[in-house]
Image (tube, grey):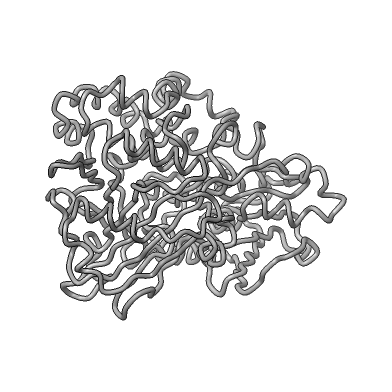
């Protein structure tokens, strides 16, 4: 009997496998695709010489992830690369707000809001070592009480809707827009409570780690995790799609790096798993995305120079415009002026493109399972702040909700977040429990459907593996390998 089987070889599944293998367990990872990676791969999507990331591209939480640090991914070939500016947010009239490597440098660009930004972010950045494990983990944990003051300060800043911070705390259009663009990563109306949590953690991560890319593409993160796993005796079998629980080999532990709805579907026919089905059958997925990968003849001609130096550009205009766009998506409508997340990875990693050329990664939020082609709307938004952009396009690779789910089945309906972030699904993911990763005896959830949710940080896999180890009888005999 195998000690542990992991279903799914995304970042969370591989982190869980590494944690268990380092503890001395015999670990087998089963992956449906021909290669490991899930939503963290690199591929040739457009023209020869252009390397694109089909899904995850920017890794704000990678350098600040306790899970990645513990596994020493940089010691196994992973190299983070950064552009001069982490994030730029253009506005009409040739203006832009920017996120820099420190709170001080960012605050200095915000004029009348300099002091307010500093007071909002500096305590979180300074106390990040005390906050990180809880901010990137489940709500109900004994460790949550270790740093009550730091966590209380974080919670007070994270609770308000992003619109409250933007409208009532900040005074300038630039600061409000910078906050709104980061909060929109929640894929929620910005009027919802806790949308500020997304801006707060993303900005803190930016000041600590710089929102980098992985040199050579996101696949290098997976390569490093696979190297750690193999070093500790773990195995991966690709092209092993699991469609029913009976296909799993006998194991003491089973961890699922799948969307929770997928696990529920696997468990539904099994009487023993019926309790888990009843418990999680109301888990909801969020909106989808429409994505375009571009091969360009030259870098994007942004009006503001800061946008030409930033790996990430949030294209959506003012806070009011972004709020309206995200409200449209939540209501099942396709916004005429969508909020567009743009990545320019080759600014930090020029080897991804032929000399003199450029690549672009861009997506907008759309209603779940949308079949609408958003190319015209996306390009109109980019052209708005970078006149002449369309003239540089050499090739496009479009990905709608259906093709995204076909590429990675965990992106159900085009949902790249593992499940909606509204209501208790944000605070109690997937359920309010001191052991939220446990699905049943010996069965655990280690995907983005579990806390802390989406992002390439491996923390759901880390926490689930630790929880799984604690359930093994005689766990003390598993000594952590050096």
Which quarter of the image is occupied by the N terminus? bottom right
**Lateral position of residue 202 relative to residue 171, left or right:** right
In x, y percent, where is residue 387? 16, 57
The image quadrant of residue 201 is top left
Where 195 falls versus 6 (above or below)? above
Of residues 325 and 61, the one nearer the viewer is 325
Of residues 248 and 325, the one nearer the viewer is 325
Where 84 falls versus 144 (above or below)? below
Whether residue 481 is visible, yes or no, is no
Number of numbered labels in the structure image: 0
Q: Residue at x 35, y 65 (%)?
A: 293
In x, y percent, where is residue 67? 47, 48
**Lateral position of residue 45 relative to residue 285, left or right:** left
**Lateral position of residue 109 relative to residue 13, left or right:** left
Question: As drawn, which residue projects farthest toward the right?
Answer: 271
In x, y percent, where is residue 31? 61, 67
Q: Residue at x 69, y 46 (%)?
A: 475
Of residues 252 and 184, the one nearer the viewer is 184
Where 225 falls versus 212 (above or below)? below
Q: Residue at x 37, y 63 (%)?
A: 292
Whether residue 35 is visible, yes or no, is yes
Of residues 80 and 303, the one nearer the viewer is 303
Q: Residue at x 65, y 31 (%)?
A: 432
Where 348 falls versus 480 (above or below)? below
In x, y percent, where is residue 283? 66, 42
The image quadrant of residue 131 is top left
């Amino acid at each position: 009997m195998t000690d542990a089987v992991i279903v799914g070889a995304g970042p969370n599944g591989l982190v869980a496998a590494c944690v268990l293998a380092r503890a001395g367990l015999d670990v087998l990872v089963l992956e449906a695709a021909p290669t490991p990676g899930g939503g963290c791969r690199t591929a040739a999507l457009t023209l020869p010489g252009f390397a694109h990331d089909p899904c995850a591209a920017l890794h704000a939480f990678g350098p600040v992830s306790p899970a990645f640090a513990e596994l020493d991914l940089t010691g196994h070939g992973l190299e983070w690369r950064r552009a001069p500016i982490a994030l730029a947010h253009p506005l009409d009239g040739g203006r832009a707000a920017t996120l820099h490597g420190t709170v001080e440098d960012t605050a200095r660009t915000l004029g009348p809001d300099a002091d307010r930004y500093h007071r909002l972010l500096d305590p979180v950045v300074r106390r990040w070592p005390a906050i990180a494990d809880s901010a990137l983990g489940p709500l109900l944990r004994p460790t949550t009480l270790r740093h009550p003051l730091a966590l209380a300060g974080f919670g007070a800043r994270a609770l308000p809707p992003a619109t409250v911070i933007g409208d009532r705390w900040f005074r300038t259009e630039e600061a409000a827009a910078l906050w709104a663009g980061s909060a929109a990563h929640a894929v929620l109306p910005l009027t919802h409570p806790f949308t500020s949590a997304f801006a707060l953690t993303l900005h803190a991560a930016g000041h600590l780690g710089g929102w980098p890319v992985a040199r050579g593409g996101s696949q290098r993160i997976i390569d490093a995790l696979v190297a750690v796993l193999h070093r500790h005796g773990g195995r991966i079998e690709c092209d092993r799609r699991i469609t029913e629980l009976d296909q799993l080999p006998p194991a003491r532990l089973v961890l699922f790096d799948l969307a929770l709805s997928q696990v529920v579907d696997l468990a539904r026919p099994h009487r023993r798993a019926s309790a888990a089905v009843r418990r999680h059958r109301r888990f909801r997925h969020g909106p989808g995305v429409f994505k375009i990968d571009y091969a360009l003849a030259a870098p994007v001609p942004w009006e503001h120079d800061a946008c030409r130096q930033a790996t990430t550009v949030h294209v959506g205009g003012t806070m009011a415009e972004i709020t309206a766009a995200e409200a449209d998506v939540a209501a099942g409508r396709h916004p005429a002026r969508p909020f567009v997340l743009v990545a320019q990875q080759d600014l930090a990693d020029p080897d991804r493109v032929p000399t003199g050329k450029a690549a672009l990664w861009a997506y907008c939020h759309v209603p779940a399972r949308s079949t609408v082609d958003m190319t015209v709307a996306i390009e109109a938004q980019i052209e708005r702040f970078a006149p002449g952009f369309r003239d540089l396009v050499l090739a496009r690779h479009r990905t709608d909700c259906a093709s995204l789910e076909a590429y990675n089945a965990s992106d159900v309906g085009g949902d790249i977040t593992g499940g909606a972030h509204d209501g208790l699904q944000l605070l109690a993911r997937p359920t309010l429990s001191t052991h939220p990763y446990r699905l049943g005896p010996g069965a655990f959830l280690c995907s983005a459907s579990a806390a802390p949710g989406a992002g390439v940080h491996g923390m759901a896999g880390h926490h689930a593996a630790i929880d799984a180890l604690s359930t093994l009888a005689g766990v003390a005999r598993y000594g952590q390998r050096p």
